[in-house]
Amino acid sequence: MNIKFGPAGLGSVKDAEKTLKEYCELGLKACEIAFTYGVYIKRKENAKRIGRTAKKLGIQLSVHAPYWINLNSENIKKTKASQQRILKCAEIGHLLGAKRVVFHPGYYGKGFRTKSRTSSAENIERNKEHAFDNIKLRVREMLEEVKKNKWDIELCAETMGKVNVFGNIEEISLLVKETGCGFCLDFAHILAREKKVEWKKIKKLFPQKNWHCHFSGIEYGERGEKHHRKTGRKEWKHLFENLPKNKNITIINEAPDTVGDSFEGLKIWEKMKKSFS
């Protein structure tokens, strides 16, 4: 099992190369650039420069698209704006030499969230199916744009942590199969949503050789994710004991201290991996 560790976040453009060198010195070989509030690397020459430094240091870059995404919006303008945000990330990500753009697909819609007495299990399932069809169409459209522009980057739909949001493991697996997009397995989100991580099912649903993952501690309730927290030592160990042994795996940490948690995970893995060889 080959694992690369890295934080969610690179920081400012000005300090990017220095930051990447600091990550490298810690032994971190991945970094997910957080465009979560907008694409802040705007100049192409900056993207190329940062990408060259990452490649030289052996750090695998990925990008996280803005949070304000809904590919199932009833407002077509909002849907198109969501697509454009993801595609802008793909454009800059290509220049960065990033492997993936991770994105949140969207919401089920008003019908799913309603608590009216007329709401039924059948209506909820119908709403879910409608959301899947809409999101599948929008993802296919974006993949066509990526292909047309010859951007060497994969669009990856993320497993989501709240019950009213599209993105349980079955939905993401099916979306991958029916569109050819990539995926991001967020194990904190899966735990928050499902209240447990069914490893056997996940391995069956995602047989791909390369796994891009998010992992951190998480606080959750009845409706799923509340917020991320520091990743506990036992949580790291449990993850390593259950990850498939025949994959290339990237683990991006989203705890409050992304760098510290990533380094802690790396140290624990270095001690444990001998037992898997």
Image (cartoon, rainbow, N blue to C red):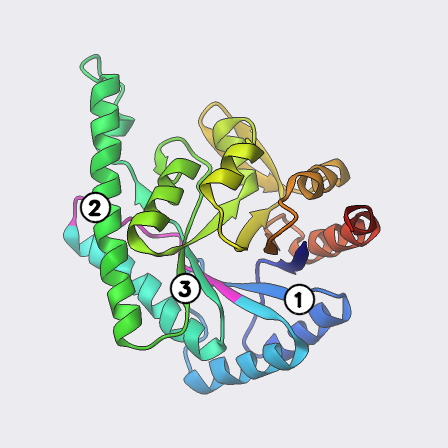
Residue shown at 65% from the left, 74% from the top? 58
Q: Is residue 66 magenta?
A: yes
Q: Do tag 2 and tag 3 residues touch (Cβ < 8 Å)?
A: no
Residue shown at 25% from the left, 25% from the top? 124
The kind of secondary structure element at disc 2 is helix
Mark 3–mark 1 distance (CA, rounded to whole Å):
19 Å
Looking at the picture, which amino acid does disc 2 mark? Asn
The location of residue 4, given as percent across then percent down, is 65, 60
Looking at the picture, which amino acid does disc 3 mark? Glu
Residue that mark 1 sits on: 29
Q: Residues within 10 Å of mark 2 (few under 14, many from 20)?
A: some
Say which label, 2 or 3, has the lower sequence index.
Answer: 2
Say which label, 3 or 1, has the lower sequence index.
Answer: 1
Residue that mark 2 sits on: 134
Above-or-below relation of 109 to 17: above
Looking at the picture, which amino acid does disc 1 mark? Lys
Mark 2–mark 3 distance (CA, rounded to whole Å):
20 Å
